Amino acid sequence: MYGGESGASPSVATLQGPLFVMSQNRQSLKDRARANTDFEINLKNEVNLEKILRELAEFQAEANERFAALEETGGSVANDE
């Protein structure tokens, strides 16, 4: 009887092998998709951050120009409207 039981174990292992490989392949595809999504999100964030930094630099340059103009006029505030 024990001989028959030991013969079943290799059969189970033979059937489980492809299932493990399929599971690993599926996980690999999920990991790759997640990595691609992360890359796209990081790229969008980087583009948005660069835009914000450009806008901040423009704002700072405009503020510096206005302060310089105020210093030249002796501190009087001119209304642009």
Image: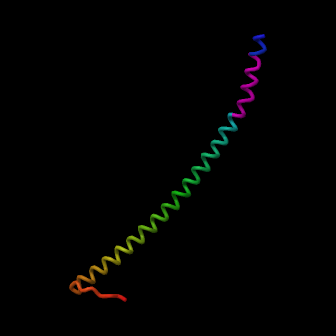
- Above or below, 35 against 55 in this view is above
Residue shown at the point (42%, 70%) measured from the top left:
54
Which region is colored magenta?
A: 6-19
Relative to residue 40, is residue 18 drawn left or right? right
Looking at this view, name the residue that lies furthest to the left: 74
Residue 17 at x, y = what percent? 71, 30
9 drawn magenta: yes
- Above or below, 17 against 28 in this view is above
- Above or below, 2 against 16 in this view is above
Residue 3 location, quadrant: top right
Residue 46 at x, y = what percent? 48, 61
Residue 23 at x, y = what percent? 67, 38
Residue 22 at x, y = what percent? 70, 38
28 drawn magenta: no
Residue 66 location, quadrant: bottom left
Q: Nearer the viewer, residue 80 or 17?
A: 80
Q: In the picture, which quadrant includes the C terminus?
A: bottom left
Q: Principal SS element in the magenta part?
A: helix
Relative to residue 76, is residue 9 drawn left or right? right
Residue shown at the point (51%, 57%) measured from the top left:
42
- Above or below, 72 against 39 in this view is below
Residue shown at the point (34%, 73%) measured from the top left:
60
Residue 9 location, quadrant: top right
